[in-house]
Amino acid sequence: MTQPSRPLRSSQPEDEVYVRDAFQYQELPPPLAKTRRPRRRGPILLATAALLALLLALAAFWVDRQIHGHPHGGPIAVTIPKGASTSSIGSLLHGKGVIGNTVVWRLYTMVKQPGPLQSGDFRFRHDENMGRVLTVLEGGGQATVHRLTIPEGSSLRQIAEKVGNIPGLSADGFMAIAQSGTIHSQFQPPGSTSLEGLVFPDTYFVEPGDNEAKILNKMVAAFDQMASSVGVQDAAAKAGVTPYDVITVASLVEEEAKVDDDRGMIARTIYNRLQKNMKLGIDATVEYAIGTHKPRLTASDLEVDSPYNTRKYAGLPPTPIAAAGQKSLEAALNPTPGPWLYYVLIDPSGKHAFATTDAEFEQLVRQARAKGLV
Protein backbone atom coordinates (compact mmCIF):
# COMPACT_ATOMS: atom_id res chain seq x y z
CA MET A 1 0.00 0.00 0.00
CA THR A 2 1.33 3.23 -0.99
CA GLN A 3 2.27 5.52 1.81
CA PRO A 4 0.68 8.93 1.86
CA SER A 5 3.02 11.53 0.61
CA ARG A 6 4.42 14.12 2.94
CA PRO A 7 4.74 17.71 2.13
CA LEU A 8 8.06 18.47 0.69
CA ARG A 9 10.20 20.26 3.10
CA SER A 10 12.85 22.63 2.12
CA SER A 11 16.29 21.55 2.66
CA GLN A 12 16.95 24.96 4.17
CA PRO A 13 16.07 25.81 7.67
CA GLU A 14 12.70 27.53 8.09
CA ASP A 15 14.19 30.58 9.75
CA GLU A 16 16.46 31.19 6.79
CA VAL A 17 13.50 31.11 4.38
CA TYR A 18 11.68 33.80 6.29
CA VAL A 19 14.76 35.95 6.45
CA ARG A 20 15.27 35.66 2.73
CA ASP A 21 11.63 36.46 2.00
CA ALA A 22 11.80 39.45 4.25
CA PHE A 23 14.92 40.65 2.56
CA GLN A 24 13.36 40.22 -0.87
CA TYR A 25 10.26 42.18 0.23
CA GLN A 26 12.39 45.03 1.40
CA GLU A 27 14.09 45.27 -2.01
CA LEU A 28 10.78 45.79 -3.86
CA PRO A 29 10.39 49.36 -5.24
CA PRO A 30 7.72 51.54 -3.65
CA PRO A 31 4.43 51.88 -5.50
CA LEU A 32 4.67 54.38 -8.39
CA ALA A 33 3.23 57.85 -7.56
CA LYS A 34 0.21 59.05 -9.55
CA THR A 35 1.42 60.78 -12.73
CA ARG A 36 0.44 64.53 -13.07
CA ARG A 37 -1.02 65.74 -16.34
CA PRO A 38 1.20 68.27 -18.11
CA ARG A 39 -0.14 71.90 -18.10
CA ARG A 40 -1.48 73.31 -21.33
CA ARG A 41 0.92 76.23 -21.82
CA GLY A 42 0.23 76.66 -25.51
CA PRO A 43 -3.15 78.45 -25.32
CA ILE A 44 -1.88 80.78 -22.57
CA LEU A 45 1.15 81.77 -24.61
CA LEU A 46 -1.02 82.32 -27.65
CA ALA A 47 -3.45 84.52 -25.69
CA THR A 48 -0.57 86.55 -24.22
CA ALA A 49 0.98 87.03 -27.64
CA ALA A 50 -2.37 88.08 -29.08
CA LEU A 51 -2.85 90.63 -26.28
CA LEU A 52 0.63 92.05 -26.79
CA ALA A 53 0.01 92.28 -30.53
CA LEU A 54 -3.25 94.11 -29.89
CA LEU A 55 -1.58 96.55 -27.48
CA LEU A 56 1.22 97.20 -29.97
CA ALA A 57 -1.31 97.76 -32.72
CA LEU A 58 -3.26 100.19 -30.55
CA ALA A 59 -0.06 102.00 -29.59
CA ALA A 60 0.99 102.25 -33.23
CA PHE A 61 -2.45 103.56 -34.17
CA TRP A 62 -2.30 106.15 -31.36
CA VAL A 63 1.18 107.34 -32.38
CA ASP A 64 0.10 107.54 -36.02
CA ARG A 65 -2.96 109.50 -34.92
CA GLN A 66 -0.76 111.95 -33.00
CA ILE A 67 1.53 112.42 -36.00
CA HIS A 68 -1.10 112.84 -38.69
CA GLY A 69 -3.66 114.57 -36.48
CA HIS A 70 -7.14 115.48 -37.54
CA PRO A 71 -7.16 119.22 -38.25
CA HIS A 72 -10.43 120.83 -37.29
CA GLY A 73 -11.80 123.94 -35.66
CA GLY A 74 -10.85 127.54 -36.26
CA PRO A 75 -7.36 128.79 -36.96
CA ILE A 76 -4.91 129.04 -34.08
CA ALA A 77 -2.36 131.86 -34.02
CA VAL A 78 1.07 130.83 -32.80
CA THR A 79 4.10 133.04 -32.32
CA ILE A 80 7.43 131.21 -32.37
CA PRO A 81 10.09 133.27 -30.57
CA LYS A 82 13.58 133.64 -31.96
CA GLY A 83 16.02 130.97 -30.83
CA ALA A 84 13.32 128.59 -29.61
CA SER A 85 14.43 124.94 -29.46
CA THR A 86 12.51 122.16 -31.15
CA SER A 87 11.43 120.91 -27.74
CA SER A 88 10.18 124.32 -26.57
CA ILE A 89 8.36 124.78 -29.87
CA GLY A 90 6.64 121.45 -29.24
CA SER A 91 5.56 122.59 -25.78
CA LEU A 92 4.25 125.85 -27.24
CA LEU A 93 2.33 124.05 -29.99
CA HIS A 94 0.89 121.59 -27.46
CA GLY A 95 -0.21 124.42 -25.19
CA LYS A 96 -2.04 126.01 -28.11
CA GLY A 97 -3.70 122.72 -29.08
CA VAL A 98 -1.88 122.44 -32.40
CA ILE A 99 -0.29 119.08 -31.53
CA GLY A 100 -1.56 116.47 -29.14
CA ASN A 101 1.58 115.09 -27.52
CA THR A 102 5.03 116.54 -26.91
CA VAL A 103 6.74 113.14 -26.52
CA VAL A 104 5.56 112.05 -29.97
CA TRP A 105 6.67 115.45 -31.31
CA ARG A 106 10.20 114.94 -29.94
CA LEU A 107 10.41 111.42 -31.35
CA TYR A 108 9.01 112.56 -34.70
CA THR A 109 11.46 115.45 -35.03
CA MET A 110 14.35 113.17 -34.00
CA VAL A 111 13.46 110.89 -36.90
CA LYS A 112 12.77 113.66 -39.41
CA GLN A 113 15.79 115.80 -38.43
CA PRO A 114 14.25 119.05 -39.76
CA GLY A 115 16.33 122.06 -40.72
CA PRO A 116 16.27 125.30 -38.71
CA LEU A 117 12.72 126.17 -37.67
CA GLN A 118 11.68 129.75 -38.32
CA SER A 119 10.45 132.25 -35.77
CA GLY A 120 7.49 134.50 -36.41
CA ASP A 121 3.71 134.45 -36.48
CA PHE A 122 1.93 131.43 -37.91
CA ARG A 123 -1.58 130.06 -38.33
CA PHE A 124 -2.37 126.41 -37.70
CA ARG A 125 -5.45 124.42 -36.81
CA HIS A 126 -6.28 122.34 -33.78
CA ASP A 127 -4.73 118.85 -33.90
CA GLU A 128 -2.58 119.70 -36.92
CA ASN A 129 -0.54 117.21 -38.95
CA MET A 130 3.02 117.29 -37.55
CA GLY A 131 4.47 116.93 -41.05
CA ARG A 132 2.65 120.09 -42.16
CA VAL A 133 3.75 121.92 -39.02
CA LEU A 134 7.39 121.14 -39.80
CA THR A 135 6.93 122.13 -43.43
CA VAL A 136 5.50 125.50 -42.43
CA LEU A 137 8.12 126.16 -39.75
CA GLU A 138 10.88 125.30 -42.19
CA GLY A 139 9.56 127.98 -44.51
CA GLY A 140 7.79 125.79 -47.01
CA GLY A 141 4.20 126.64 -46.11
CA GLN A 142 1.86 129.59 -46.47
CA ALA A 143 0.86 129.94 -42.82
CA THR A 144 2.85 133.09 -42.05
CA VAL A 145 0.62 135.91 -40.90
CA HIS A 146 1.16 139.55 -39.98
CA ARG A 147 0.80 140.53 -36.35
CA LEU A 148 -1.15 143.76 -35.86
CA THR A 149 -0.99 145.11 -32.32
CA ILE A 150 -3.27 148.02 -31.42
CA PRO A 151 -2.26 149.66 -28.11
CA GLU A 152 -4.89 151.04 -25.76
CA GLY A 153 -5.38 154.74 -26.35
CA SER A 154 -4.85 154.53 -30.12
CA SER A 155 -6.91 156.81 -32.33
CA LEU A 156 -8.53 155.51 -35.49
CA ARG A 157 -5.92 157.35 -37.59
CA GLN A 158 -3.09 155.73 -35.64
CA ILE A 159 -4.71 152.33 -36.15
CA ALA A 160 -5.02 153.02 -39.87
CA GLU A 161 -1.31 153.82 -40.06
CA LYS A 162 -0.48 150.46 -38.50
CA VAL A 163 -2.76 148.68 -40.96
CA GLY A 164 -1.07 150.55 -43.80
CA ASN A 165 2.30 149.09 -42.77
CA ILE A 166 1.11 145.64 -43.82
CA PRO A 167 2.03 144.84 -47.43
CA GLY A 168 -0.96 145.16 -49.72
CA LEU A 169 -3.04 147.23 -47.30
CA SER A 170 -3.66 150.97 -47.19
CA ALA A 171 -4.10 153.41 -44.31
CA ASP A 172 -6.30 155.66 -46.43
CA GLY A 173 -8.36 152.67 -47.54
CA PHE A 174 -8.87 151.67 -43.92
CA MET A 175 -9.97 155.19 -42.93
CA ALA A 176 -12.31 155.44 -45.90
CA ILE A 177 -14.11 152.27 -44.86
CA ALA A 178 -14.15 153.35 -41.21
CA GLN A 179 -15.88 156.61 -42.16
CA SER A 180 -18.21 155.18 -44.80
CA GLY A 181 -20.85 153.80 -42.46
CA THR A 182 -20.71 150.34 -44.03
CA ILE A 183 -19.49 148.76 -40.78
CA HIS A 184 -21.43 149.45 -37.60
CA SER A 185 -21.02 148.92 -33.88
CA GLN A 186 -24.06 148.08 -31.80
CA PHE A 187 -23.10 151.05 -29.57
CA GLN A 188 -22.91 153.54 -32.44
CA PRO A 189 -25.51 156.32 -32.14
CA PRO A 190 -28.14 156.58 -34.90
CA GLY A 191 -26.90 158.61 -37.82
CA SER A 192 -23.25 158.40 -36.82
CA THR A 193 -20.68 157.09 -39.28
CA SER A 194 -17.68 157.43 -36.97
CA LEU A 195 -16.10 154.30 -35.53
CA GLU A 196 -13.67 156.29 -33.38
CA GLY A 197 -13.40 154.53 -30.01
CA LEU A 198 -15.51 151.60 -31.21
CA VAL A 199 -12.64 149.25 -32.05
CA PHE A 200 -10.99 147.00 -29.48
CA PRO A 201 -7.29 147.54 -28.78
CA ASP A 202 -5.79 144.08 -29.06
CA THR A 203 -3.42 141.95 -31.14
CA TYR A 204 -4.82 140.72 -34.44
CA PHE A 205 -3.35 138.30 -36.95
CA VAL A 206 -3.80 139.34 -40.55
CA GLU A 207 -3.78 136.44 -42.98
CA PRO A 208 -3.09 136.55 -46.70
CA GLY A 209 -6.26 137.73 -48.40
CA ASP A 210 -7.53 139.83 -45.48
CA ASN A 211 -8.50 143.33 -46.62
CA GLU A 212 -9.10 146.58 -44.72
CA ALA A 213 -12.84 145.92 -44.34
CA LYS A 214 -12.32 142.46 -42.89
CA ILE A 215 -9.74 143.72 -40.40
CA LEU A 216 -11.96 146.62 -39.29
CA ASN A 217 -14.93 144.30 -38.93
CA LYS A 218 -12.91 142.05 -36.61
CA MET A 219 -11.94 145.02 -34.46
CA VAL A 220 -15.48 146.34 -34.15
CA ALA A 221 -16.90 142.90 -33.40
CA ALA A 222 -14.25 142.40 -30.71
CA PHE A 223 -15.14 145.76 -29.15
CA ASP A 224 -18.87 145.00 -29.13
CA GLN A 225 -18.22 141.67 -27.45
CA MET A 226 -15.95 143.15 -24.79
CA ALA A 227 -18.18 146.16 -24.11
CA SER A 228 -21.24 143.93 -23.78
CA SER A 229 -19.39 141.65 -21.37
CA VAL A 230 -18.70 144.54 -18.96
CA GLY A 231 -22.28 145.87 -19.23
CA VAL A 232 -21.98 149.05 -21.32
CA GLN A 233 -25.55 148.47 -22.50
CA ASP A 234 -26.64 149.12 -18.89
CA ALA A 235 -24.90 152.53 -18.77
CA ALA A 236 -28.07 154.46 -17.87
CA ALA A 237 -28.62 152.38 -14.74
CA LYS A 238 -24.96 152.24 -13.75
CA ALA A 239 -23.64 155.69 -14.60
CA GLY A 240 -26.70 157.73 -15.51
CA VAL A 241 -25.54 158.38 -19.07
CA THR A 242 -25.92 156.75 -22.47
CA PRO A 243 -23.72 153.80 -23.53
CA TYR A 244 -22.00 156.03 -26.10
CA ASP A 245 -21.25 158.65 -23.42
CA VAL A 246 -19.71 155.93 -21.23
CA ILE A 247 -17.49 154.92 -24.14
CA THR A 248 -16.48 158.56 -24.66
CA VAL A 249 -15.67 159.00 -20.95
CA ALA A 250 -13.71 155.73 -21.05
CA SER A 251 -11.61 157.10 -23.92
CA LEU A 252 -10.78 160.19 -21.85
CA VAL A 253 -9.86 158.02 -18.88
CA GLU A 254 -7.66 155.90 -21.15
CA GLU A 255 -5.73 158.99 -22.26
CA GLU A 256 -5.47 160.60 -18.81
CA ALA A 257 -4.81 157.67 -16.43
CA LYS A 258 -1.29 156.36 -16.10
CA VAL A 259 -1.89 153.92 -13.23
CA ASP A 260 -4.92 151.67 -12.77
CA ASP A 261 -5.79 153.01 -9.31
CA ASP A 262 -6.56 156.43 -10.80
CA ARG A 263 -9.03 155.29 -13.46
CA GLY A 264 -12.18 155.24 -11.31
CA MET A 265 -11.30 158.57 -9.65
CA ILE A 266 -10.63 160.30 -12.97
CA ALA A 267 -13.94 159.00 -14.30
CA ARG A 268 -15.71 160.39 -11.24
CA THR A 269 -13.99 163.77 -11.66
CA ILE A 270 -15.20 163.95 -15.27
CA TYR A 271 -18.79 163.13 -14.27
CA ASN A 272 -18.67 165.67 -11.43
CA ARG A 273 -17.54 168.45 -13.77
CA LEU A 274 -20.19 167.50 -16.34
CA GLN A 275 -22.88 167.71 -13.67
CA LYS A 276 -21.70 171.21 -12.76
CA ASN A 277 -21.48 172.24 -16.44
CA MET A 278 -17.78 172.89 -16.01
CA LYS A 279 -15.39 172.64 -18.92
CA LEU A 280 -13.47 169.40 -18.71
CA GLY A 281 -10.18 171.09 -19.66
CA ILE A 282 -8.58 167.81 -20.77
CA ASP A 283 -5.48 168.42 -22.87
CA ALA A 284 -5.81 165.05 -24.62
CA THR A 285 -8.91 166.36 -26.37
CA VAL A 286 -6.94 169.37 -27.60
CA GLU A 287 -4.25 167.05 -28.97
CA TYR A 288 -6.97 165.08 -30.75
CA ALA A 289 -8.29 168.32 -32.23
CA ILE A 290 -4.89 169.42 -33.58
CA GLY A 291 -4.06 165.88 -34.68
CA THR A 292 -0.78 165.42 -32.82
CA HIS A 293 0.65 164.73 -29.40
CA LYS A 294 2.91 167.32 -27.81
CA PRO A 295 4.90 167.30 -24.57
CA ARG A 296 3.70 170.87 -24.00
CA LEU A 297 0.69 172.53 -25.64
CA THR A 298 1.12 176.13 -26.72
CA ALA A 299 -1.33 178.95 -26.12
CA SER A 300 -2.43 178.78 -29.74
CA ASP A 301 -3.01 175.03 -29.40
CA LEU A 302 -5.29 175.62 -26.43
CA GLU A 303 -7.32 178.11 -28.44
CA VAL A 304 -7.98 175.82 -31.40
CA ASP A 305 -11.59 176.17 -32.46
CA SER A 306 -12.83 172.61 -32.37
CA PRO A 307 -15.72 170.87 -30.60
CA TYR A 308 -13.06 168.49 -29.29
CA ASN A 309 -11.33 171.33 -27.42
CA THR A 310 -12.69 170.79 -23.92
CA ARG A 311 -10.75 173.81 -22.68
CA LYS A 312 -12.90 175.95 -24.95
CA TYR A 313 -16.24 174.11 -24.96
CA ALA A 314 -18.16 172.48 -22.12
CA GLY A 315 -19.44 168.94 -22.24
CA LEU A 316 -18.06 165.77 -23.77
CA PRO A 317 -16.35 165.81 -27.16
CA PRO A 318 -18.56 164.71 -30.08
CA THR A 319 -17.00 161.23 -30.21
CA PRO A 320 -14.53 159.16 -28.22
CA ILE A 321 -10.94 160.21 -28.86
CA ALA A 322 -9.22 156.84 -28.49
CA ALA A 323 -9.70 153.09 -28.25
CA ALA A 324 -10.38 152.37 -24.59
CA GLY A 325 -9.38 149.13 -22.92
CA GLN A 326 -11.57 147.07 -20.63
CA LYS A 327 -10.26 148.67 -17.40
CA SER A 328 -11.15 152.16 -18.58
CA LEU A 329 -14.62 151.06 -19.67
CA GLU A 330 -15.20 149.46 -16.28
CA ALA A 331 -14.03 152.66 -14.57
CA ALA A 332 -16.40 154.78 -16.67
CA LEU A 333 -19.26 152.42 -15.79
CA ASN A 334 -18.39 152.22 -12.10
CA PRO A 335 -16.64 155.48 -11.11
CA THR A 336 -15.14 155.71 -7.64
CA PRO A 337 -17.42 157.71 -5.30
CA GLY A 338 -15.97 161.12 -4.42
CA PRO A 339 -16.43 164.91 -4.72
CA TRP A 340 -13.33 165.64 -6.83
CA LEU A 341 -13.31 168.34 -9.48
CA TYR A 342 -9.58 168.41 -10.28
CA TYR A 343 -6.64 166.06 -10.67
CA VAL A 344 -2.96 166.80 -11.13
CA LEU A 345 -0.02 164.57 -12.02
CA ILE A 346 1.90 164.42 -8.76
CA ASP A 347 4.44 161.62 -9.16
CA PRO A 348 6.81 160.46 -11.92
CA SER A 349 5.16 157.05 -11.73
CA GLY A 350 2.06 158.60 -13.31
CA LYS A 351 0.06 158.83 -10.10
CA HIS A 352 -2.42 161.71 -9.86
CA ALA A 353 -3.56 163.65 -6.81
CA PHE A 354 -7.19 164.80 -6.56
CA ALA A 355 -8.75 167.99 -5.25
CA THR A 356 -12.20 169.42 -4.64
CA THR A 357 -11.56 173.16 -4.24
CA ASP A 358 -9.63 175.71 -6.27
CA ALA A 359 -7.22 176.23 -3.37
CA GLU A 360 -6.44 172.52 -3.14
CA PHE A 361 -5.92 172.42 -6.88
CA GLU A 362 -3.48 175.35 -6.86
CA GLN A 363 -1.49 173.72 -4.06
CA LEU A 364 -1.21 170.47 -6.04
CA VAL A 365 -0.10 172.40 -9.11
CA ARG A 366 2.70 174.08 -7.11
CA GLN A 367 3.84 170.66 -5.86
CA ALA A 368 3.82 169.27 -9.36
CA ARG A 369 5.80 172.22 -10.73
CA ALA A 370 8.38 171.83 -7.98
CA LYS A 371 8.91 168.26 -9.19
CA GLY A 372 9.07 169.37 -12.81
CA LEU A 373 5.95 167.41 -13.73
CA VAL A 374 3.91 170.27 -15.23
Image: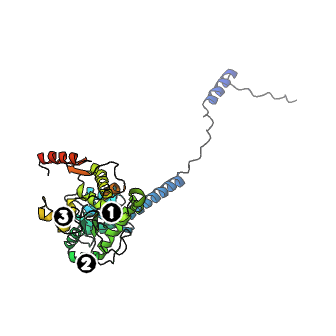
- Sequence-wise first label, 1 or 2: 2
* Label 3 vs 2, first from the N-terminus: 2
| Coordinates of residue 7 in the picture (x, y in percent) | 78, 28
Residue 247: assigned label? 1
Does residue 127 appear in this view?
Answer: no
Residue type, mark 2 in image = Ala
Q: Could you tell me which secondary element the residue under label 2 belongs to?
A: helix
Mark 3 → mark 2, Cα distance in angstroms: 22 Å
| Residue that carries the numbered disc 3 in the rendered image | 287
User: Residue drawn 35% across and 75% down?
Assistant: 191
Q: Residue at x 45, y 57 (%)?
A: 55
Q: Nearer the viewer, mark 1 or mark 2?
A: 1
> Vertical placement of 216 versus 82: above or below?
below
| Nearer to me, 136 or 161 | 161
In this rendering, the answer to whether 282 lies above or below 9 is below
- Direction from residue 75 to residue 116 in the image, left or right: left
Q: Nearer the viewer, residue 205 or 116?
A: 205
Expressed as whole percent of the image width and height from the top left, the position of residue 18 reads 68, 24
Does 97 appear above or below 353?
below
Q: Which residue is mark 2?
A: 176
How packed mark 3 is, by other alpha carbons closer than 10 Å (few <14, some 14-19, many 20 or more), is some
What type is the residue that disc 3 sits on? Answer: Glu
The part of the image, by quadrant, that contains residue 216 is bottom left
